[in-house]
Image (cartoon, rainbow, N blue to C red):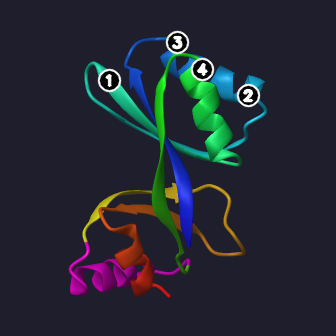
Amino acid sequence: MKIKQVSIFLENTPGHLEKACKALADGGINIQTITIAETKDYGIVRTVVDKPEEAVEILKNAGMVAKIVDVLAIEVDDTPGALLAILNKTAEAGVNIEYMYALTHPFKDKPVMVMAFKDVDAAEKIFK
């Protein structure tokens, strides 16, 4: 299923992540999952929230760089090799996963992996 992720570009210094989280909390935005990829000076916060368009507007108004990115949320059986089966499908189709992380709130009773692709529409067809 295609979902919207909010990506936030932050300076990698104390207080910047807190500022982003406070802005979202004050705006009534619920963070459903979050991951951070960092370098020495900067970080990219990737988060799934309940109201992505509002979240981006709130973050921009707080002086941050934020954008919406389409990603796929894919249910994964909670068994050995289940993720491998998904990776095999994408490899066979020649579709590269750019990054992924787990969604903390499953849709039903299965874990959910969030995956980013250059062509999210092509990747989504693999799992329909």
**In the rendered image, which residue does mark 1 sit on?**
42
Mark 4 neighbour class, 10 Å CA radius: few under 14, some 14 to 19, many 20 or more: few
Closer mark to the observer between disc 4 and disc 2: 4
- On-image quarter of the N terminus: bottom right
Q: Secondary structure at mark 2?
A: helix
Q: Decide whether the magenta segment is chiefly helix, strand or loop.
A: helix
What is the CA distance from the residue labelled 2 to the residue labelled 1? Answer: 22 Å
The residue labelled by disc 2 is 25
Q: Earlier in the sequence, mark 4 or mark 2?
A: 2
Mark 4 or 1, closer to the camera: 4
Q: Secondary structure at mark 1?
A: strand
Tag 4 residue:
61
Q: Which residues are magenta?
A: 78-95
Amino acid type for the residue under numbered disc 1: Tyr
Disc 4 to disc 2, C-alpha distance = 14 Å
Depicted 51 relative to depicted 12: above or below = below
